[in-house]
Image: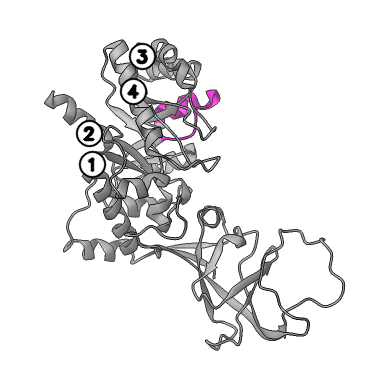
């Protein structure tokens, strides 16, 4: 059966390394869990690893987090939509916002539920997804800073999430300046600047992020070890935490070029593959994963001698050269997924999800390891306030 495996030792390493970079910067972070699509056992594994602040963009996933055995601080990453305001206040401690009218609705609902809801004001910094224009930031803040049952934690930004805009030190300095101007004008402390996503990690690791950026929302690089800016893998992180394993159902020597006339009638996007001469032959393996399961173009064979050349709804064809490993029917082939491929694999009901080692075994193993107990982000703000 097709299975997607999450390796807890690799994941623990990446969480520890990211936490090291963040804490050396004097900041806090929330683990973005949306790639797990609310999968209970995976979320439970994160809690076992000591993660106490989780950020997600789907309310159904936040419902799954709410069912964990211990309370977890939750951040809602998707801009709140009015029909869901009640659930957002119920399920999320913090939300990211760019519309004053929505924050007013959050305030009314938080008052009705007798809860305090915290917000980050998102500022448009060049990625052109969401955010208040910097020139409107003062008026925006003046409208919402005194709303009942709302605490404005600070401001934030998203870079690299839509347009591929690479985060720069200058942009972070600008964000810090907007934050400082708000504090000076309104004579109120805003304890947080939430500075971005996994795209920031290389700057954070190298110590070039301004000290005033004190919160990060990190997901993809923790799970996949990817360097979103430089490509490939981020030095210091493991990229073997997630593995897809599928079954080989055919291995035959065949022509490496199709026979007869070809058209563009294929239902899925054509793969770019190496050029082969007419009549050239080699071994091809057919494996039990297809476009119904995932974005096959986002799968990378662990054996770099292999090449995916095409996929239908249910099957994928892989050139295996001279079949150096002697693959036969019933063997398995393993892949590393991209972020997009992993999301679809987690959503797929056709893919088994596995945790290795099992949680009970892992709990026994980590008794001899130093703790990864990562405190909730909001606890650190409370500590700062107590020290003033």
User: Which residue was labeled with disc 2?
Assistant: 379
Q: Are marks 1 and 4 in contact (CB under 8 Å)?
A: no
Q: Are marks 1 and 2 in contact (CB under 8 Å)?
A: yes
Tell which circle, 3 or 2, labels the residue nearer the N-terminal end.
Answer: 3
Q: Residue 145, labelled with which disc? A: 3
Q: Residue 157, labelled with which disc? A: none
Q: Splitting the image into 4 quarters, where does residue 369 fall?
A: bottom left
Measure how far apart labels 2 and 4 are at the Cα level: 21 Å
Work out which residue is located at the far left of the displayed protein and give it. Answer: 387
Nearer to us of marks 1 and 4 is 4
Reply above or below: 101 against 210. Answer: above
- Residue 384 picture location, percent across and down: 18, 29
Q: Residue 375, labelled with which disc? A: 1
Label 4: which secondary element: helix
Residue 81 counted in the magenta span? yes
Q: Are marks 2 and 4 in contact (CB under 8 Å)?
A: no
Label 1: which secondary element: loop
Tell which circle, 3 or 1, labels the residue nearer the N-terminal end.
Answer: 3
| Most foreground residue, 361 or 80 | 80
Reply above or below: 361 against 150. Answer: below
- Residue 317 picture location, percent across and down: 66, 73
User: Which residue was labeled with disc 4?
Assistant: 179
Q: Seen in the image, is 288 located left or right of residue 120?
A: right
Measure how far apart labels 1 and 4 are at the Cα level: 25 Å
Measure how far apart labels 3 and 2 are at the Cα level: 21 Å
Q: Which residues are magenta?
A: 76-90
Measure how far apart labels 1 and 2 are at the Cα level: 7 Å
Scheme of image coloration: one colour
- Residue 165 picture location, percent across and down: 50, 40
């Amino acid at each position: 059966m097709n299975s997607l495996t999450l390796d807890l030792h690799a994941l623990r390493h990446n969480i520890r390394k990211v936490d090291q970079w963040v804490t050396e910067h004097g900041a806090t972070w929330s683990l973005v869990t949306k790639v797990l699509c609310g999968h209970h056992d995976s979320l439970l594994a994160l809690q076992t690893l000591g993660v106490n602040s989780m950020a997600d963009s789907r309310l159904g996933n936040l419902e799954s987090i709410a069912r964990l055995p211990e309370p977890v601080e939750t951040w809602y990453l998707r801009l709140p939509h009015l029909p869901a305001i009640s659930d957002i206040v119920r399920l999320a401690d913090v939300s990211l916002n760019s519309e004053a009218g929505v924050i007013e609705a959050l305030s009314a609902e938080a008052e009705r539920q007798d809860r305090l809801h915290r917000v980050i004001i998102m500022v448009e910094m060049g990625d052109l997804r969401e955010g208040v224009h910097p020139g409107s930031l003062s008026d925006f803040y003046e409208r919402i800073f005194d709303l009942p049952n709302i605490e404005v934690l600070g401001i934030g930004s998203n870079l690299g999430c839509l347009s591929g805009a690479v985060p720069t030190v200058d942009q972070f300095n600008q964000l810090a300046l907007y934050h400082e101007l708000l504090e000076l004008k309104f004579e109120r402390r805003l304890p947080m600047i939430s500075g971005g996503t996994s795209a920031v990690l290389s700057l954070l690791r190298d110590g070039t992020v301004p000290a005033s950026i004190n919160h990060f929302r990190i997901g993809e690089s923790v799970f996949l070890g990817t360097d979103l800016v430089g490509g490939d893998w981020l030095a210091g992180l493991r990229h073997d935490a997630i593995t897809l394993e599928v079954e080989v159902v055919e291995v035959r020597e065949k022509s490496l070029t199709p026979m007869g006339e070809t058209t563009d009638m294929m239902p899925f996007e054509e793969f770019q593959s190496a050029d082969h001469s007419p009549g050239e032959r080699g071994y091809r393996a057919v494996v039990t994963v297809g476009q119904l399961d995932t974005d096959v173009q986002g799968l990378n064979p662990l054996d770099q001698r292999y090449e995916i050349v095409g996929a239908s709804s249910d099957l994928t064809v892989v050139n295996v050269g001279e079949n150096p490993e002697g693959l036969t029917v019933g063997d398995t082939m393993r892949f590393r997924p991209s972020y997009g491929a992993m999301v679809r694999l987690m959503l797929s009901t056709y893919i088994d999800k596995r945790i290795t080692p099992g949680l009970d075994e892992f709990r026994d193993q980590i008794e001899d390891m130093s703790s990864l107990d990562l405190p909730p982000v909001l606890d650190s703000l409370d500590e700062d306030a107590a020290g003033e």
